Amino acid sequence: MSVCGVASGLYAIGFPGMPEMLIVLFLALLLFGGAKLPGLMRNLGKSANEFKRGMSESADDDELSDKKSDE
């Protein structure tokens, strides 16, 4: 299967649009309540930032080890 075929298959499934996102937000509000939701989103943002920072540190470490092995 070609890359083009895979990409068209992903679009056939469909990515979540605005109505789907509103439904997810409504369900999260029902499950967690209005008071806990901002804290959950804040923690989700912090964990995403930590993941990105860890990935960039890993890439930096890989570059340093490649440079050392070339010498």
Image (tube, rainbow, N blue to C red):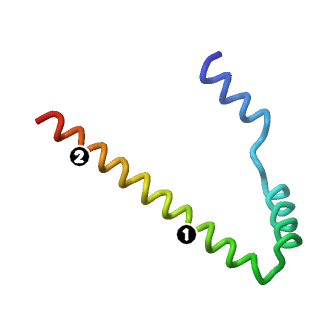
Q: Residue at x 79, y 36 (%)?
A: 13
Quarter of the image where the C terminus is located: top left
Amino acid type at image mark 1: Lys
Q: Residue at x 36, y 55 (%)?
A: 57
Residue assigned mark 1? 46
Q: Residues within 10 Å of mark 1 (few under 14, many from 20)?
A: few
Q: Are marks 2 and 1 in contact (CB under 8 Å)?
A: no
Q: Position of residue 50 (x, y in %)?
A: 49, 63
Amino acid type at image mark 2: Leu
Q: Quadrant of residue 53?
A: bottom left
In the image, 65: left or right of 34? left
Sequence-wise first label, 2 or 1: 1
Mark 1, secondary structure of its residue: helix
Q: Position of residue 20 (x, y in %)?
A: 83, 55
Q: Residue at x 82, y 67 (%)?
A: 28
Q: Quadrant of residue 30?
A: bottom right
Mark 2, secondary structure of its residue: helix
Residue assigned mark 2? 64
